[in-house]
Image: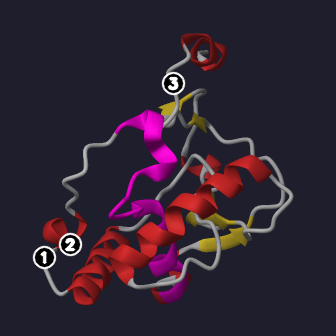
Amino acid sequence: MMLVRPTGLEDILAGGVPSLYYDVWHSDFEQGTRAMSRQVWPPAVWRSMGRTLEVDWMVTPLWLYWASTFKGARSAIEAYRGMPFLQAVYSDVPYQWQKFPEHPFSLCDMQALGIYASESEKHKYSIRQLDGPLDMPVKQFWSHAPFEEAKLRAFII
């Protein structure tokens, strides 16, 4: 994740709290991305938390969470798996970005954090459904996609 323009907290907070966006699986917005997310992340969330991923929490390239959200999500995973967090999410399957959709992910941290924040810490976030492109001060470059220097250069100030 890279900052692509000067920014401040006022650009990423809503009413003084972090913004947390989600979108429904059948959304018309970014259909290809949503289809890939729906293929990969619900099984990972089920494996790590035993929870059904009702919506997609990975819809913006900016995630800002309170420390308590990390602690709570980790605790939820530990409780479900009955073991310490690092053991619960360990994978001995080497990751290859070219085989991204087939990889048996043991955790999707952003989805787990979104679930926990939306259910247990609603008061700490401005939770909103995505309704179109956002003018975010960051750009996400995914590990499961080839690096394209030309695209990166287009975002450099």
Q: Amino acid at mark 1?
A: Pro
Q: Amino acid at mark 3?
A: Pro
Residue 94 seen in render: yes
Q: State whether the magenta stretch is mostly helix, strand or loop.
A: helix
Percent position (x, y) of residue 123?
54, 84
Percent position (x, y) of residue 12?
60, 52
Foreground: disc 3 or disc 1:
3
Percent position (x, y) of residue 135?
74, 41
Left or right side of 94 for 57:
right
Q: In terms of sequence position, does the residue under pointer 3 or pointer 2 come before the other?
A: 2
- Residue 143 falls inside the magenta stretch: no
Magenta segment: 96-119
Question: In terms of depth relative to the viewer, which is nearer, 71 or 89?
Answer: 89
Give the labeled residue for mark 1.
84
> Contact (CB < 8 A) between labels 1 and 2?
yes
Q: Name the residue: 58% across, 36% down.
A: 138
Q: Which mark is residue 146?
A: 3
- Determine whether the residue tagged by mark 3 lies in a helix, strand or loop: loop
| Residue 109, picture quadrant | bottom left
- Residue 116 falls inside the magenta stretch: yes
Percent position (x, y) of residue 90?
20, 61
Give the labeled residue for mark 2.
88
